[in-house]
Amino acid sequence: MAESKELLHDQYANILRAYLEEQSEQGLYYAQQFSKRVLEEQISPEEVVSLHLEVLEEFFPELPKGAHESFELLLEVMMGYGLAYREHQSLRDKTKELEAEINVAANMQQTFLPDEIPHVNGLDVGVLSVPASKMSGDYYHFVKDDHDCVGLAIADIIGKGIPAALCMSMIKYTMDSYPEQRLQPGALLENVNRVVEQNIASNMFITMMYGSYDSRSHQFNYAGAGHEPGFYYKAAEDTFEELHAKGIVLGIKRNTNYKEYQLTVDPGDFVVLLSDGVTECRTDDGFIEREAITRLIRTYQHLPAQEIVNHVFYELERAQGFQLRDDFTLIILRRNV
């Protein structure tokens, strides 16, 4: 250690002497290189100031008293700076560690979402889910049975970050563990609710809507647990209706019954499921009304379902200055004409 300090002393003395004699750009370059070495060897700022004063006293033994005392003051200043700098470095290291954990959780979240949309004869499906940040509080799920019936869920976890990712995993595996009931919306929500109530913190809640589409009868059965109402478009009347499904949010009360609702989906009709990041889109002028969402959908309803959700997302993202303020999830199920 003593040898290393001696080498640093000699190196700095040479750099300072050369600069005082020539005052060249090259001298400044050498100083910058020296600072990199100082950082690598974790030498504190006050030690650098002390080194400078030591070398300066060697060059100028008759250094004025005031100049010497001014360096003593600078040394005290740099000691405080050094402490703050080390605290900053420690905080930055912890932040990097947290970011790495969040990246792992975000990647884990992606594995919970469907790899692909199930293909069902006579049904056009579009879905888009975009997080406002790395971690999303939105979740969606598709499953198809042997009779070409499709079940779908959309959920919003009140909370974000790693706890939301853990809740998301719990929802997915709970739903997957009830294959014989997965297309019965009310029963599925009751099962999920019991698991959620037992396993999540009292300050966390989950809203969900689950529906099943029977491609043989063209019936859409659904139930909701406090989730944002969707829309139902009736092609024959060219009208949108709100898709309400009353039910308490998941995790509040263990033994809860969820009422099922039923729609007959005629050719050209479609069901819209969404998260509140769609209907509560915020711009500088305030919230976008629900009617604005249906107007957007109507504008692009001549396109395939996937293109509709893509266009709606783009328009709402643009309205927010291309900066999402909440997670966005939009699903459209349309019966082909």
Image: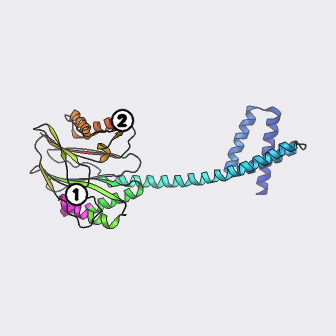
In the picture, the quarter occupied by the N terminus is bottom right
Assess whether residue 93 is covered by the magenta stretch.
no
The residue that appears at 82% across and 46% down in the rendered structure is 69
Q: What's the colour scheme?
A: rainbow
Q: Which residue position is annotated with label 1?
A: 247
User: The disc labelled 2 sits on which kind of residue?
Assistant: Asp
The residue that appears at 25% across and 35% down in the rendered structure is 296
In this view, the residue farthest toward the front is: 286
User: The disc labelled 1 sits on which kind of residue?
Assistant: Gly
The residue that appears at 36% across and 54% down in the rendered structure is 109
x and y percent of residue 78 in the render?
72, 48
Q: Which residue position is annotated with label 2?
A: 285
Task: Find residue 3 and report its image quarter.
Answer: bottom right
Quick one: SS at disc 2?
loop
Q: Which of 8 and 325 is in front in this view?
A: 325
x and y percent of residue 312 in the render?
28, 37
x and y percent of residue 243 in the render?
19, 48
Marks 2 and 1, the one that precedes in the sequence: 1
Q: Give the range drawn in magenta.
A: 175-192
Residue 334 at least partly seen? no
Depicted 194 relative to depicted 229: above or below: below
Residue 32 at least partly seen? yes
| Badge number at residue 126 | none
Q: Which of 241 and 102 is in front in this view?
A: 241
